[in-house]
Structure formats: structure tokens, C-alpha cells
Image (spheres, rainbow, N blue to C red):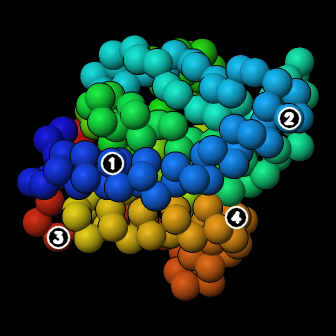
Amino acid sequence: MSDYPGKRLLDVVGASAGAALFAPVMAAIATATWLEDGPPLLFLQRRVGRDRAPFTTFKLRTMRAQRVTQVGQWLRRTGLDEVPQFLNVCRGEMSLVGPRPLTANDIERLGWHSSTLDWRFAAKPGITGLSQLLAGRGAKASRRLDRLYLERQSLRLDVQLLALSFAANIVGKTAVREWIRQARPRVAPSRAAGSPPLKA
């Protein structure tokens, strides 16, 4: 699955600008996390990327001893725990927008290790995307929305999804999902005109 022209440029420019924009917020979050329960500040985890290649994601830590911290609850609600993944984007392991990055255990649990689902791993995973914004934790919905995104991906769609994700950082994912549902009650996975269908 090839990227549309300019996607890598959007990734590099957007991730660099995002890192600079969120730097003061990250400093405040780091201080709050340190004061609540000390280091470490980051959570590193192996994920499966493009062409099923493994890589390590960077996230702000939200748990301690299997318990979500107070700071972590807010980070998860706003999605700010994923801001360190701008580094993954700059390194070329992720994109700003794409399918949700999964762990090897996730793939095994969902039964997505079959070659019939290689289409889903033909693109870089994204910090945000249709699945991340709309699907919650539903496997069927996530797969449907990942397919829809890959069929319709474009600069315009990516900018729209990034704008919605930025709004989620401010008002929370739940509010943004409600806005989207009110604007478009049903998202049908139809193919964009002129774009080739993905192999099942």
C-alpha cells in the first residue's frame, strides 16, 4: 500500500510542529507525574508496524502497579499520553494518521495473523485515525474503519482527522466522538470513486 504524495512530508512537518507545540504541556505533565508517583515518565512497548515489522512505541506512563494513576486518567481521556509518538513518526516507524498500532499479543488474540489481513499492515500505523477516533475497543469496527481509511486516505482526510484529534486533546475523546456521530450517524465502508479495492 503506497502512501499518497506528500504524506511523509506531512508526517515530518506535523510531528516536528506538534512536538514544539506540546512541549510546555509535556513539561507540566512530566512534573505532575513525578510528583504523583515518581519515575519513569515514559512507557515503552513493542508494537507491530508496516509489513508486520516490530518497533518500540513511546508513550507517557499512565499506570503504576496495574493501577491507572490520577494523571494517567486525564492523559487517556485526552489522548495526550500518545504525544511522545511524534518521535516514532520522525523516525519513520509511524505516521500521524493510520491504522491503530497493535501488539503481537493483540494480533494473536484477534486472529489477525493470517495473510488475508496483510492489507491492514501495508501502511504505517498512526498516532490517530478513523479507528482511534471512532471505534473504541471493538475489533470488527476497528477493522472496518482501518479498511475505510486505507481506501480513502488523502491529504484532506488526514488534515481533518488531525484537527479532530487536536480537539480531543482539549475536550476529550468522548466529546469528539459524539460530535462525529451527530455529524455523520453512519460511516459506510464504501470505496472512493476511482480507487482500487483492497484485497480481503
Q: CA distance from mark 4 to mark 1?
A: 23 Å
Say left or right for 169 vs 53: right
Position in image of residue 173 (x %, y %): 67, 62
**Amino acid at pointer 3:** Ala
Tag shown at residue 193 = 3
For residue 143, above or below residue 129: above
Quarter placement of the N terminus: top left
Position in image of residue 75 (x %, y %): 72, 48
Residue 119 sits in quarter? top left
Mark 3: which secondary structure?
Answer: loop
For residue 140, above or below residue 173: above
Tag shown at residue 35 = 2
Answer with mark 3 or mark 1, whichever residue precedes in sequence. 1
Answer with mark 2 or mark 4, whichever residue precedes in sequence. 2
Mark 1: which secondary structure?
Answer: helix
- For mark 4, what is the residue? 172
Q: CA distance from mark 2 to mark 4?
A: 24 Å
